[in-house]
Image (cartoon, grey):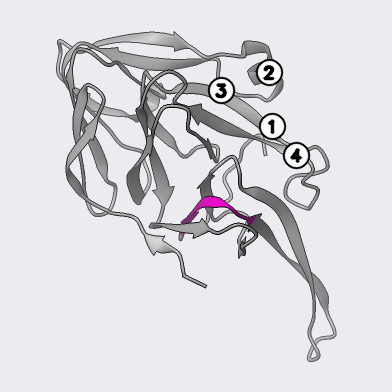
């Protein structure tokens, strides 16, 4: 098996539609976007680190309000418009990285990993069903879905620790600690894999639980696998 490969931790000359950007910082990295006025950027309101005064900020409604209320998700994001610079970071050590989405492509993202996206990317919620284990209960769980519906776009994510990417071939599988995955292509299938453990010394019985991902497609894996309080 080809092992997962670490994603770049620093980008000095990144390009997105209407935006140039850089990512830098060793402990709590920062995304710095320079907008030319043609492409807004949207994000969660608490991730803005600084901005130039001429960059306008407004609320952005999220599609599927009723579904998001049922899932306990937020109904509004924040959007930046205009010509100028704005920077984002999360209050946690980790790894900021881009995912380029060509027109028609989509990506599923774990909750609390989203940092920002170009306005050309549509943001919605997906409910992954059929997962029944100690972590998710019997009804599945919610993930963020980003889709470049009409044009190319970029989504920037924050991973805890460092982020590695595994590209799965058709039918190839990998087991990942349930708090360790960040994103996956919609074509990737995920199901629980439960291992019973018995120790001869203490005669104890327990369970070791993984998420098993099956290709084809990409899976992002973070090394600081936190189990944050969430709707999962």
> Mark 3 sits on what residue?
124
Q: Secondary structure at mark 1?
A: strand
The answer to whether residue 230 is left or right of residue 8 is right
Residue 88 lies in quadrant: top left
| Of callouts 4 and 3, the N-terminal one | 3
Q: Secondary structure at mark 4?
A: loop
Relative to 20, does residue 61 appear above or below in the rendering?
A: above
Q: x, y percentage for residue 79?
A: 35, 15
Q: Secondary structure at mark 3?
A: strand
Q: Residues within 10 Å of mark 2 (few under 14, many from 20)?
A: some
Residue 25: say if magenta. Answer: no
Q: x, y percentage for residue 50?
A: 21, 26
Residue 219: say if magenta. Answer: yes
Q: x, y percentage for residue 225?
A: 52, 56
**Gap between marks 2 and 1, in whole Å?**
10 Å
Look at the numbered discs 2 and 1 and tell me whether their residues touch, using CB distance below 8 Å.
yes
Q: Secondary structure at mark 2?
A: helix
Q: Tell me what residue is drawn at x 37 percent, y 27 percent.
A: 117
Of residue 74 and residue 101, the one placed in the foreground of this image is: 101
**Gap between marks 4 and 2, in whole Å?**
14 Å
> Mark 2 sits on what residue?
67
Look at the numbered discs 1 and 4 and tell me whether their residues touch, using CB distance below 8 Å.
yes
Q: Tell me what residue is drawn at x 38 percent, y 19 percent.
A: 120
Q: Tell me the number on the disc at residue 140.
A: 4
Secondary structure mostly seen in the magenta stretch: strand
Of marks 4 and 3, the one in the foreground: 3
Q: Tell me the number on the disc at residue 204.
A: none
Q: Which residues are magenta?
A: 214-222
Q: Tell me the number on the disc at residue 127.
A: 1
Look at the numbered discs 1 and 3 and tell me whether their residues touch, using CB distance below 8 Å.
no
| Of callouts 3 and 2, the N-terminal one | 2
Q: Tell me what residue is drawn at x 67 percent, y 39 percent.
A: 232
């Amino acid at each position: 098996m080809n092992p997962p490969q670490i994603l770049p931790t620093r980008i000095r000359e990144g390009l997105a539609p209407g935006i140039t950007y850089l990512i830098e910082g060793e402990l709590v990295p920062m995304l710095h976007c320079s907008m030319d006025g043609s492409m807004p950027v949207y994000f969660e309101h608490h991730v803005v680190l600084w901005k130039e005064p001429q960059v306008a900020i407004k609320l952005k409604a999220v599609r599927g309000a009723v579904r998001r209320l049922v899932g306990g998700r937020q109904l509004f994001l924040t959007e930046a418009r205009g010509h100028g610079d704005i920077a984002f970071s999360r209050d946690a050590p980790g790894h900021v990285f881009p995912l380029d989405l060509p027109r028609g492509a989509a990506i599923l993202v774990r909750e609390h990993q989203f940092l920002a996206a170009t306005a050309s990317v549509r943001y919605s919620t997906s409910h992954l069903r059929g997962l029944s284990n100690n972590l998710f209960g019997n009804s599945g769980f919610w993930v963020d879905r980003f889709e470049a519906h009409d044009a190319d776009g970029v989504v920037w994510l924050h991973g805890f620790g460092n982020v590695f990417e595994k590209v799965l071939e058709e039918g190839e599988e990998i087991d990942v600690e349930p708090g360790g995955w960040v994103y996956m292509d919609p074509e990737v299938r995920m199901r629980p894999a439960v291992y019973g453990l018995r120790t001869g010394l203490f005669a104890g019985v327990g369970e070791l639980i993984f998420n098993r991902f099956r290709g084809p497609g990409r899976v992002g894996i973070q090394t600081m696998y936190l189990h944050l309080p969430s709707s999962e």
